Amino acid sequence: MSAQVVPFVDHGKTQLSENDDGPKLAVSSDAHGTGLGGLAPNAQTGRLFIAVFTGAKRTGGFGVEVERVSRKGDRLEIHARFAEPPEYALVTQVLTSPAQLVSIDRREASGVRAAILMDSSGVERAHVAVRQSEL
């Protein structure tokens, strides 16, 4: 089964997402339901919001960039690049928790059962079941 590319809107990034765990996904028809609603204060209806979290980091220099959203059957795949500071780089000594909020048209997700977060090398970093009530 081939993947279908799904257009997405980037609502922004933060370095302070309050996610103290590792990589994580949150999917909701309400931007605030993802924990990153502040990045889309005037969000329109009819969107499915997808929040991508890297998890807690002990220094600056980390980040996440959603590169592509695709659909394979009943799976939504979110492909993201996870940035790290180079070895021996001078970075700020501050706790961060990088995250990004994107959205897709909810109609593109009709029948989706799971959302999978994939890194640039194709490794699954996180997954979440998608409640049909969100679609």
Image (cartoon, rainbow, N blue to C red):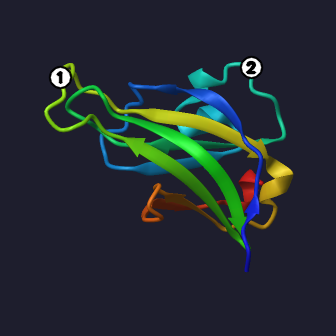
x then y, percent, for residue 120: 47, 55
Report the residue at 37% width, 31% height from top: 18
Left or right: 14 as drawn, with respect to 18:
right
Separation of residues labelled 2 and 1 (CA atoms): 37 Å
Residue in the image at 66% along x and 53% along y? 69
Foreground residue, 24 or 120? Answer: 120
Q: Quadrant of residue 36?
A: top right
Q: Earlier in the sequence, mark 2 or mark 1?
A: 2
86 or 9, nearer to the observer: 86
Q: Compared with residue 7, is residue 110 higher up or lower down, i.e. above or below? A: below
Q: Where 77 sits versus 11, above or below?
A: below
Type of amino acid at the residue the image marks with label 2: Asn
Amino acid carrying label 1: it is: Leu
Percent across and percent down for residue 8 are 73, 42
Q: Which residue is mark 2?
A: 42
Give the foreground label among 2 and 1.
1
Q: State which quadrant residue 32 falls in.
A: top right
Element class at badge 1:
loop
Question: Residue 6's x, y, as percent?
Answer: 76, 53
**Looking at the rendered structure, which numbered label has been put on residue 78?**
none
Question: Could you say which quadrant of the image residue 70 lies in?
Answer: bottom right
Numbered marks: total = 2
Q: Judge left or right: residue 102 versus residue 5.
A: left
Q: Which residue is mark 1?
A: 90
Residue 61 lies, with reference to residue 81, above or below; the image says: above
Q: Quadrant of the C terminus?
A: bottom right
Residue at 65%, 45% in the rendered image: 28
Q: Position of residue 62 (x, y in %)?
A: 33, 34
